[in-house]
Each structure stands twice: as structure tokens, then as C-alpha cells.
Image (tube, rainbow, N blue to C red):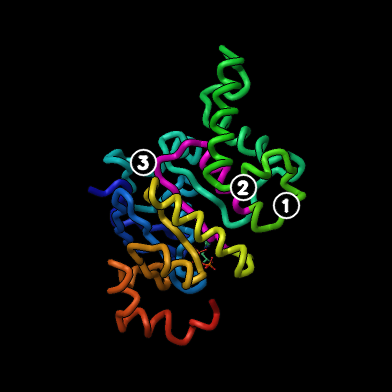
């Protein structure tokens, strides 16, 4: 059964339709990658799934519940975690503090604690667990600014995990990384894929092909192919439309 599903999802910006009639379904334990050339509508899809923008038409359901048009904080609380294309960490805060803040953002009244001590402890536990999950326990007390770019992206994944999501949406988690750094993130994503269903938007095709179960290929806002990785990767339509001439761009 699908955990996350879109039905005829469409988003227009004035005269431009960035996402047109997209219907995808992501099952339990599935890594669903969305690929496509620049301007294909991938980021718009991510923004529609996580509530950053409302759709023009169509529907998004999560665990059978209609979440279309809900605000990002509601969607986060419902259990969909999102990482951003650009690093969102607080540079002067330590890794633990960054994760602590993210954990706290999920609390109902972030700054008006009823049982302050209990909530504090619970955020601390979540933060420590998130650091462990993203492989940064050894950097617990290091300020984000003192870490490499790759580690900061890793921390951002930790911050997403500190919100205790049940589903992950990752927007170009390998962007701007060197080979060694992206190798680490690929390993991390493989680990996470054992526990979370996830949607991954990524330009690094080696990474996508090594992690994804399902591939959706978008061109100009439209899905041109979607299905099991091997079938879609090797389909002529995809080779011609995307992986052919444009491959060197990635
Ligand atoms: N807020 C917006 N207002 C107007 N047009 C937008 C907006 N956001 C995206 N677009 C347009 O929608 C189209 C799809 O953009 P989108 O960023 O979703 O593509 P993408 O596949 O993520 O591209 P990239 O790989 O370059 O990130 C583009 O033509 C873009 O210019």
C-alpha cells in the first residue's frame, strides 16, 4: 500500500505549468527518486509534497490522509521530514544544539513549556538519537561552522531526523559535494532507507542508481517514465529524453 501518493498533481506559475498531472505512489520501504533535467519541476514537486507551496489542482495523501495544501509545519508534525537544497544549519551552534532546536520545533508549544524539564530531556534524547542516526555523534559539541560542507549537509539530515519523521523528502542531499563526501551521504541514505520510505531528488546519477528502487523521470513538468529502477533507466524514452545528450551535465 502507498504511504505517500499524489493524484494528478499540478502547479502553475502564471502561464507556466511547472508540474503537470503528476501521479506517483511511494510504498513502505521504497526509495523513490525523481530525476530530470534543469527546470523539469523536481523542486516544485518537493515543495508541493512538503507544503511549501499549494498545488493549483490535484491531491497529496499521506498514510491515507488528504494533506493537500497543509502548511509546512503541519506536514512536518504529521511525519514528513524534509531536507533542503541549501544548508540550513545555524553556524555558531553545535551539532547537538542544531538537532535540539529541530527536535523542539516539533513540540506543540516550543517556548511555553508546561513541564519544562521533561520536555527539555525529551528534546535532548531526540537530538542525541538524531546525531547517532546521521553519523555525527563524534561531532556532538563541534560548531557547525567548524565542519566541512559535507558534514553540514549530514547535520542537516540529522536535524530532519530530530523531528522524528516517518517519511523523508530529500532535495539534492549530495549537491555541491566532492566524491568522498557524497560517498558518505550515499552510505547514510542507504542506512536510512532501511527504516524510512523516502523521496529523493538528486542530480548525481551514480548515487540515484545505487540507492533508488523506483525512478520517476520528469521533463518540462511532465512524467515521461516511472517504475522500477532497471526498467526505467534502460527505457529508450528516458535514454533519449534525458540520460542521452544531457548526461555530461550531471
Ligand atoms: N516560484 C516560482 N515562480 C515562477 N516560476 C517558478 C517558480 N518556481 C519554479 N518555477 C519555474 O518552474 C519550472 C520548474 O522549476 P523547478 O525548480 O521545479 O525545476 P527543477 O527540476 O527542480 O530544476 P533544477 O534541477 O534546476 O533545480 C522552471 O521553469 C522554473 O523557472
Q: Which residue is mark 2?
A: 155
Can you see residue 58? no
- Could you tell me residue 28's position as x and y percent? 30, 48
- Could you tell me residue 167's position as x and y percent? 40, 45
Q: Does 128 appear in magenta?
A: no
Separation of marks 1 and 2 at Cα, in angstroms = 10 Å
Q: Residue at x 29, y 58 (%)?
A: 23
Q: Which residue is mark 1?
A: 147
Earlier along the polypeptide chain: callout 3 or callout 1?
A: 3
Decide if residue 127 is on the left or right side of residue 13: right
- Could you tell me residue 145's position as x and y percent? 76, 49
Separation of marks 2 and 3 at Cα, in angstroms = 28 Å
User: Does 205 sit above or below residue 214?
Assistant: below
Farthest left residue? 1
Task: Please provide the residue range marked out in magenta.
Answer: 153-174
Q: Are marks 3 and 1 in contact (CB under 8 Å)?
A: no
Decide if residue 14 is on the left or right side of residue 65: right
Earlier along the polypeptide chain: callout 2 or callout 3?
A: 3
Frontmost residue, 212 versus 9? 212
Amino acid at each position: 500500500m502507498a504511504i505517500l501518493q499524489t493524484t494528478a498533481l499540478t502547479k502553475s506559475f502564471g502561464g507556466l505549468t511547472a508540474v503537470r498531472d503528476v501521479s506517483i505512489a511511494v510504498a513502505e520501504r521504497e526509495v523513490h527518486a525523481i530525476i530530470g533535467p534543469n527546470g523539469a519541476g523536481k523542486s516544485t514537486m518537493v515543495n508541493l509534497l512538503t507544503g511549501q507551496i499549494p498545488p493549483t489542482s490535484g491531491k497529496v495523501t499521506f498514510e491515507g490522509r488528504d494533506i493537500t495544501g497543509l502548511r509546512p509545519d503541519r506536514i512536518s508534525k504529521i511525519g514528513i521530514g524534509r531536507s533542503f537544497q541549501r544548508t540550513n544549519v545555524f553556524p555558531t551552534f553545535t551539532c547537538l544544539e542544531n538537532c535540539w532546536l529541530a527536535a523542539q520545533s516539533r513540540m506543540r508549544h516550543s517556548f511555553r513549556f508546561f513541564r519544562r524539564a521533561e520536555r527539555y530531556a525529551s528534546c535532548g534524547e531526540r537530538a542525541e538519537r538524531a546525531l547517532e542516526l546521521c553519523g555525527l555523534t563524534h561531532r556532538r559539541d563541534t560548531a557547525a561552522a567548524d565542519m566541512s560542507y559535507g558534514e553540514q549537509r549530514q547535520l542537516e539530515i540529522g536535524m530532519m531526523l530530530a523531528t522524528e519523521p516517518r517519511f523523508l523528502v530529500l532535495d539534492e542531499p549530495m549537491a555541491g559535494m566532492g566524491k568522498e563526501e557524497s560517498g558518505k551521504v550515499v552510505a547514510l541514505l542507504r542506512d536510512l532507507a532501511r527504516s524510512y520510505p523516502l523521496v529523493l531528488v538528486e542530480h548525481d546519477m551514480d548515487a540515484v542508481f545505487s540507492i533508488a528502487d523506483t525512478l520517476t523521470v520528469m521533463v518540462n513538468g511532465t512524467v515521461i517514465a516511472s517504475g522500477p529502477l532497471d526498467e526505467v533507466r534502460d527505457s529508450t524514452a528516458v535514454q533519449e529524453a534525458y540520460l542521452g545528450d544531457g548526461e555530461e551535465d550531471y
